[in-house]
Amino acid sequence: MTAVKAIALAASLFVPSLAAAQDTDAILEARQGFMSLLSFNMGKLSGMAKGEIEYDAEAASVAASNIVALTNYDIWPLFVEGTSSEDLDNSDALPAIWENPDDFRAKFAALREAAAGAPATVGGGQEALGPALQQLGGACKSCHDDYRKDD
Ligand code: ASC
């Protein structure tokens, strides 16, 4: 092995622990896209709850089912170390996520539990939306309070 190769190999051993610069953009894009999908479906439900969107039982159930599907997505690979709000300007993910990974995962699991019954509930009439949204929004907020940087 030449000295140059040895140095390159030694250097490469340090790289895998951090997201490569090239990957970071893709990770953030996917992570923020995931959050946008959650928010988009929450927005449908809250629009109907407020009367800004006409209530439609089927559309409400679809939005809630989409939230269920999203909560079954394994988001942990999107939370790669080196992508916190202290590492990147365009990240709102607080470093606390990586300091308390079990709690972070438990809070996402709580959203999954809150969402589980929602498709049936929100199909039951416009008045069912408020309580369902309180449950879902409460789970969103409890995680954001600890792990998302304030705007
Ligand atoms: C949403 C959304 C959030 C949560 C949060 C709940 O619809 O985009 O981030 O609900 O506002 O408190």
Image (tube, rainbow, N blue to C red):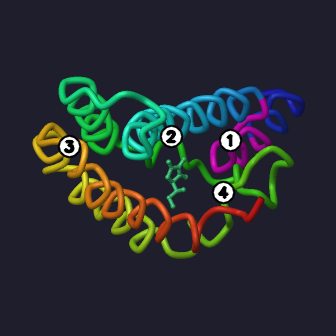
Query: Which callout, 3 or 4, points at the residue further toward the start of the chain?
Result: 4
Query: Splitting the image into 4 quarters, where does residue 133 fall?
Result: bottom left
Q: Residues within 10 Å of mark 4 (few under 14, many from 20)?
A: many
Q: Residue at x 26, y 32 (%)?
A: 60
- Which residue occupies 10% across, 42% down? 120
User: Residue 12: within the magenta?
Assistant: yes
Instruction: Give the number of the mark in front: 1 or 2.
Output: 2
Query: At x 42% / y 59%, what residue is drawn?
Result: 137
Which residue is under mark 3? Answer: 122
Q: Earlier in the sequence, mark 1 or mark 3?
A: 1
- Please name whichever residue, 18 or 26, is drawn nearer the observer in this view of the structure: 26
Residue 102 within the segment the image draws in magenta: no
Which numbered circle lies on residue 93? 4
Give the structural element (helix, strand or loop) at label 2: helix
Q: Position of residue 93 (x, y in %)?
A: 66, 57
What's the residue type where badge 3 is placed?
Answer: Val
- What residue would you read off at disc 1? 19
**Which quadrant holds residue 113?**
bottom left
Q: Residue at x 19, y 47 (%)?
A: 118
Between the C-alphas of marks 3 and 2, the distance is 16 Å
| Label 2 sits on residue | 39
The span from disc 1 to disc 4 (Cα, nearest Å) is: 15 Å
Could you tell me the amino acid type at mark 4? Ala
Placement of the N terminus among the 4 image quadrants: top right
Q: Position of residue 124 (x, y in %)?
A: 11, 42
Q: What's the distance in space between the residues labelled 1 and 3, CA to CA?
A: 40 Å
**Element at badge 3?**
helix
Disc 2 within 8 angstroms of ligand 1 (CB): yes
Stretch in magenta = 10-21
